[in-house]
Image (tube, grey):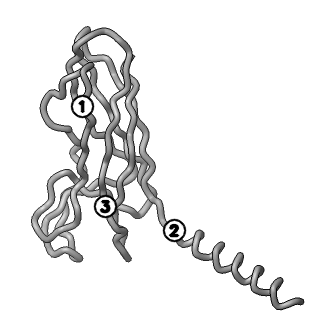
Amino acid sequence: MKKSNLIVVLTLLVAGTVKAQIHDPVKWSTSAKKVSDTEYELIATAHIEDGWHLYAQSVPDDGPRPTVFSFEGNSNYLKKGNTKEAEGHTVDDPIFEMRIKYFSEETAFKQRIKLKNDTPFKVNGVVEFMVCNDEMCLPPKEVDLTFEVK
């Protein structure tokens, strides 16, 4: 085999191995549920791979990064209150040595909005979160979210 062909093959093998080791254990989906004529609930659902934990919006200092939602404002709506989360699991975490709330498998976060008009629009947002399993924690990640309000 020529030296240049060998380099190409080795590069492809290394690239394939590196790609196979990238973890992405949380997939997000969004929806918007009509609550009344003037209110909607924006729902961000986290689908979490087995063995992984997504942390709550409030965690003690020196703990993992909390899950944080931010919503891009526009003239079609007003945000009502804070983003609500499910009950989850609260445990004494041996890694962080503190009591921490986390979610596994699937959980939903809900944000109420008040409509300013009846025109369909999109709400853009971002969720920043951190996940861990029994062996490692991944660096915090940001994911763009889009909610269709009809």
Percent across and percent down for residue 143 are 38, 49
Left or right? Give the position of 15 relative to 67.
right
Q: Secondary structure at mark 3?
A: loop
Looking at the rendered structure, the kind of residue marked 3 is: Met
Residue at position x 69%, y 80% in the image = 11
**Between discs 2 and 1, the one toward the N terminus:** 2
Q: Tell me which residue sits at (27%, 19%) in the image.
A: 76
Residue denoted by label 3: 130
- Tell which residue pokes out farthest to the left in this image: 61
Crowdedness near tag 2: few (<14), some (14–19) or many (≥20) residues, C-alpha within 10 Å: few
Picture quadrant of residue 58: bottom left
Q: Residues within 10 Å of mark 3 (few under 14, many from 20)?
A: many
**Residue 1, position as x, y percentages in the image:** 89, 89
Residue 41, label in figure: none
Q: Amino acid at mark 2?
A: Ile
The circle on residue 22 is 2
Viewer-side residue, 149 vs 137: 149
Q: Judging from the image, what secondary structure is the residue with disc 1 in?
A: loop
Where does label 1 land, which residue? 73
Lateral position of residue 105 relative to residue 22, left or right: left
Q: Depth check: 70 or 104 in front? A: 70
**Nearer the camera: disc 2 or disc 1:** 1
Question: What is the residue that sits farthest to the front in this orientation?
Answer: 4
Front residue of this view, candidates 133 and 117: 117
